[in-house]
Image (cartoon, coloured by chain):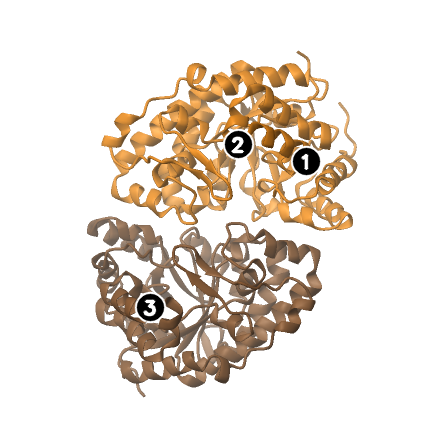
Chain colours: A orange, B brown
Amino acid sequence: MTLQNDLLLRTARGELTERVPVWMMRQAGRVLAEYRAVRERAGSFITLAKTPELAAKVTIQPVDAFDVDAAIIFSDILVVPEAMGLPYEMIESRGPVFPQTVRTTADLSRLRVANAESDLGYVLDAIRLTKKELNGRVPLIGFAGAPFTIFCYMTEGKGSKTFSVAKKLLYKDPVFAHTLLQQITDSTLAYLKAQVRAGVDLVQLFDSWAGILTPEQYRLFSLPYIKQICDALGSEIHDGVVSHAPVPVTVFAKGAFFARHEIGQLACSVVGLDWNMDPAESRELIPNKVLQGNLDPCVLYADYAQIRAEVKRMFDAFGHQHYIANLGHGIYPDTEPDKARCFVDAVKELGTAQGFSN
Amino acid sequence: MTLQNDLLLRTARGELTERVPVWMMRQAGRVLAEYRAVRERAGSFITLAKTPELAAKVTIQPVDAFDVDAAIIFSDILVVPEAMGLPYEMIESRGPVFPQTVRTTADLSRLRVANAESDLGYVLDAIRLTKKELNGRVPLIGFAGAPFTIFCYMTEGKGSKTFSVAKKLLYKDPVFAHTLLQQITDSTLAYLKAQVRAGVDLVQLFDSWAGILTPEQYRLFSLPYIKQICDALGSEIHDGVVSHAPVPVTVFAKGAFFARHEIGQLACSVVGLDWNMDPAESRELIPNKVLQGNLDPCVLYADYAQIRAEVKRMFDAFGHQHYIANLGHGIYPDTEPDKARCFVDAVKELGTAQGFSN
């Protein structure tokens, strides 16, 4: 099906475009009353994620409400460990919890490499249904957690400020760590390939806990696994020419400011930046990729004039090409929808490329 | 009183020294059985901090156990908001909680600028007692939270991954934010001056939540207040010459990788680095200060050979002068004391300066 709005896809592929495309991490819908209504009807987050009709519905809500240039499939990065044999629970106001954890080589026997079609069919169904219902309006983004971030949850068993249990394993039992990371990588790759077959137009890897590692540990325990996934999935852009681009891959490694140069060397098309990362410095460190980001989500608490001023600052810093406007992390649930809309509108108004000719 | 071991103090003042000094953030004592015994006897963390005899006892324990080159007074950064009229509770396994918060200009009327002698006399008593009991063995470090980090707790009311309530106030009500930050700064400065009068040999500012801000917000809401404190307290080192150095000041802004150059311009003597920050890059960004850090505390989960190897890597990267060996953040409570001791021993063995002559 031909996309009516393929702006984000063209930008992600490295093309020059007439305007900066915009979407909002991670599920902008959660600020919407219509999302909360569906969420309540579903009874739980996990039920919502596992019911394709409802997942498709809340995936499309932000496109209707904010007129963003892409949708991102409603799901969670923790569906992968669940598909590997480690179920999780989502506990209100506490976040995800794994009743069982994986911390030894013996624990690995409880796990399998995920079979995307059988174990994650509900996500693939949601993707197919969303594509059908979007009817070509905007591209659909698929996603997964980066292997190290998934490793953090599977070993720690819950969110943490330090993830010191997960990190301890890297130092104490690197063989176990690499074995588990490879199993997660194999599962994630199978899952992302299935997402592509089901119809997603782009994929994004979220390395949400990249920032807890030393640069050295990041090079050992995170980057090689992201590289495997990019090599298998990614487009390749050399000297600005796209050699093949079945589905552009975005790598977003929150907090990994120290690894920007290396991330820029991966076979991905887009690199996501968090709000700590200076745009000009990031352009220098990552010269040949499309950049995505990086408005502090808290700016959406400010008034309309401030939001517009911050969007202008982003364009002054990033320019208007090879750039996808986004937040620097997920939108906060108590953001007023009108402020999110103001952000999108400001990007559209101020993001028109000067002197663009097709 | 003359210090028998003034190595850390001389290094902090910018002098060349015969060995790299070492201590461990933040209270190494909490990994010790003898600390836990005193903590249990006290009944609560806050009682322990408020009883000078016990605070002095646990302050000295790590010097006995690990033979570090400095002690740091046992206390908490949240004693300052308490002294300003906002008491906190320390809830087991949850951390600090403020039953009341400060979020509006009207709330400010409940606060006062702390009177260090009357409101924080128990810390000053603990410092005087510790100095007496240390009897000149090693220098004593005093400390406080940086104003922005204290602002986070006073407005948010508890720890948070995002501190989005605190950050929201920066965008929505900057006048309120600056007023509160100034009141915290005035209180902190009075408190640190009183610590110096009571006998501390160095002071350290902990900006624990620096990393949640954008570079721009950090320049607006954190750095100017740290600068006020450094200007009032700090030593000044120009071209390697110490012009006056009553008490060296260390600034440790966790996560503020983007502000290293600016922090290096402050009138402080030492800049602390977390484990994300590359030593060589940090030396370039902060050329004229002593650096402190930055071992990942999780390295202390590794075996002895690995700990020694990581210490050697630190010296390869930082060199042996203008450097204080430390962790990149606080030690984790479940660290084995022998591993902490191994770290200190490795620094002492491998940290001898080549070709040093006095």
Of the numbered discs in the image, which one, if any, rests on residue A165? none
Q: In this image, A228 relative to A308: left or right?
A: left
**Which quarter of the figure is the C terminus of chain A placed in?**
top right
User: Which residue carries the number 2 mark?
Assistant: A45
Q: Mark 3 is on which residue type?
A: Gly
Q: Report x, y in % for residue B289.
A: 45, 67
**Observer-nearest of B20 and B142:** B142
**Observer-nearest of A331 and B98:** B98
User: Which residue carries the number 1 mark?
Assistant: A33
Q: In this image, B331 relative to A326: left or right?
A: left
Is the residue A310 above or below the residue B78 in the image? above
Residue drawn at x 49%, y 84% is B118
- SS at mark 1 in the image: helix
Task: For label 3, count other residues whose C-alpha is less than 10 Å away and answer few (under 14), some (14-19) or many (20+).
Answer: few
Q: How far apart are marks 1 and 3 (CA)?
A: 47 Å
Say yes or no: labels 2 and 3 on the same chain. Answer: no
- SS at mark 2 in the image: helix
Q: Report x, y in % for residue A214.
A: 39, 47
Q: Contact (CB < 8 A) between labels 2 and 3? A: no
Q: Contact (CB < 8 A) between labels 1 and 3? A: no
Q: Mark 1 is on which residue type?
A: Ala
Q: How far apart are marks 2 and 1 (CA)?
A: 15 Å
Residue drawn at x 39%, y 83% is B125
Report which quarter residue B19 is drawn in.
bottom left
Q: In this image, B6 relative to B221: left or right?
A: left
Does any portion of residue B15 appear in the rendered image?
A: yes
Q: Distance between the residues labelled 2 and 3?
A: 41 Å
Chain ID for label 2? A
- SS at mark 3 in the image: loop
Residue drawn at x 30%, y 85% is B132
User: Which residue carries the number 3 mark?
Assistant: B43
Q: In this image, A96 relative to B326: left or right?
A: right
